[in-house]
Image (cartoon, coloured by chain):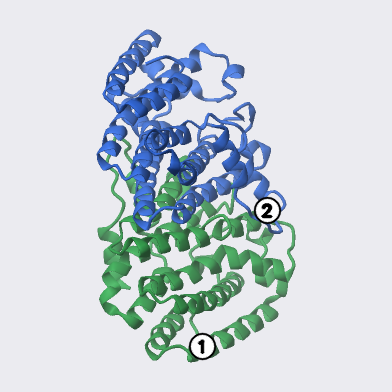
Chain colours: A green, B blue
Amino acid sequence: MQNFENFLVKNLPVSKSIHPVYEKALHQMLLAGGKRFRPALLLGVVNAYNPLLQSGAMHAALAIEMLHTYSLIHDDLPAMDNSPLRRGNPTLHVAFDEATAILVGDALNTYSFEILSNAPFSDYTRVALIRELAHNGGLNGMVLGQAIDCYFENKPLQVEDIKFLHTNKTAKLIAASLKMGAIILNKEALGAMLYNFGIKLGLLFQIQDDILDVTQSSQEAGKLTNNDEAKNSFVTILGLDEAMSQANTLAHELSKELSSFDENLKHELSALLTHYINRHI
Amino acid sequence: MQNFENFLVKNLPVSKSIHPVYEKALHQMLLAGGKRFRPALLLGVVNAYNPLLQSGAMHAALAIEMLHTYSLIHDDLPAMDNSPLRRGNPTLHVAFDEATAILVGDALNTYSFEILSNAPFSDYTRVALIRELAHNGGLNGMVLGQAIDCYFENKPLQVEDIKFLHTNKTAKLIAASLKMGAIILNKEALGAMLYNFGIKLGLLFQIQDDILDVTQSSQEAGKLTNNDEAKNSFVTILGLDEAMSQANTLAHELSKELSSFDENLKHELSALLTHYINRHI
């Protein structure tokens, strides 16, 4: 993912004005590391079929990372998760102030669509990418998931409800990242298949995150949340053993689906999942 | 604008889930009245040249109103203007809570682009509309303006800086509303002309708003802001007389430009400006 990091650094949002820290605040969370999991998924799909489209696909990967980054900035706010640390650094509202953090999040949200509107694709592809990102990252996707997460703090959810929560909060954007790769390739059936795969992958990703939250120290995780105990998680609802068991079941299902994929795609995604999910599926 | 109100009510965002108030919160500020100034500008331009395109143009007008509404919800937050009232009603973070207000704003921001991605236009027009809205409503437009407004609270600005602030915070979205009408009509030169007209119109709109803030009671204005006195305004920087004089100069310039417009466009915009700007220009 070194190529993506270079592309990101060269394509940071530019905003020169009398505001002394706005541009710096726009860049800070984008440059604070992060796993770049969603860009890697999109680029992996494109690379499996047509590596010549990689450089164009970088724009779409960047748009997803912008949207993902805005969501982290807003999730960390005092009115939501109230997190002082993210990726081992002070969160944006701590480093600057709340107004700046809200506005930088707003700016990155909108900017993700501006990037896609100017990306080097046909208008047909641009519109399909914008529709996919907005649909999964918006009011019946990621934002709904976070709204449920916040509303049901201190109110235990049923198993099916926490699955719904994280299907929206986490899995839909992961699924959209894979599908957007297929949109760039103009492969509609592949997109539908990858979207379903991505929903399961997103749930696995979240269950493992919840497991790591209780088995890893906050220093290792690089984040600190004041109200983690009040939040619903797969571990608080299922217990650690059952959460691990469900993670294994999902990993098994994903492994089976993966084996039916085209050889190059299987190769790309296996490598990514080994790297990111930290187990061979 | 009764047609637009009906269209809005029929096209409110739908989100059914276990969240008991999310959908209600999404609707509340959209239905709380508002002048619908930006939709009226877009629809006025389209109507001047091709009334048959009105029903399609409603989608674009709706997208602009969604984006404008999200900006009001976020501007009212405690970390920004800390306003308890908007349009005579409790602001969203007062009626619900801060997390809900932030998330509803986020959802409406993203939804404006989803609406445009599905609007009944060619992909070429959809992309041009998305680019225009994102560029003017985003990090080097409306959001930058609000960031400067918040950062320079209690720090008096120079005249040229407050013009820059409101060119971004207010005028660019008004200019984009006019230009998006021209984009729907596929009239590029008209779009450029209307954009410049809209920037001046937006500044006039803001100066008059600042004048009304000091000459009208908060009950008449239907809003209450705790820190209005700490904010830069054309009146605090120029004084009331000079602000009124600059408003007259702008109105005179707009009137002159308007007289050079095509007959139908002149007719549509004159009627709108008389209605909204509350003076004949």
Q: Which of these two is toward me, B268 or B272? A: B268
Quarter assignment of residue A69: bottom left
Q: Which residue position holds label 1?
A: A281
N-terminal of the pair, mark 1 or mark 2, is 2
In the displayed structure, does residue B114 sit left or right of residue B7?
A: left
Where does residue B109 sit, x and y in percent of width and height?
49, 47
Where does residue B280 sit, x and y in percent of width and height?
41, 14
* Quarter that holds the N terminus of chain B: top right
Residue B207 is at least partly visible in this image: yes
Quarter assignment of residue B243: top left
Please determine whether, in this image, residue A34 is positioned above or below residue B70: below
Please determine whether, in this image, residue A262 is positioned above or below residue B23: below
Where does residue B74 sit, x and y in percent of width and height?
52, 40
Where does residue B237 sit, x and y in percent of width and height?
36, 17
Q: Chain of mark 1?
A: A
Q: Amino acid at mark 2?
A: Tyr
Q: Which of these two is toward me, B230 or A184? A: A184
The numbered dot on residue A190 is none
Q: How many marks?
A: 2
Q: Residue at x 70, y 66 (%)?
A: A161
Q: Residue at x 42, y 87 (%)?
A: A266
Is disc 1 in the same subunit as disc 2?
yes
Please determine whether, in this image, residue B100 is positioned above or below residue B246: below
Q: Amino acid at mark 1?
A: Ile
The numbered dot on residue A151 is 2
Q: Which of these two is toward me, B220 or A240? A: B220
Q: Chain of mark 2?
A: A
Quick one: label 1, few (<14), some, or many (20+) residues within 10 Å?
some
In the displayed structure, does residue A144 sit left or right of residue A269?
A: right
Residue B77 is at least partly visible in this image: no
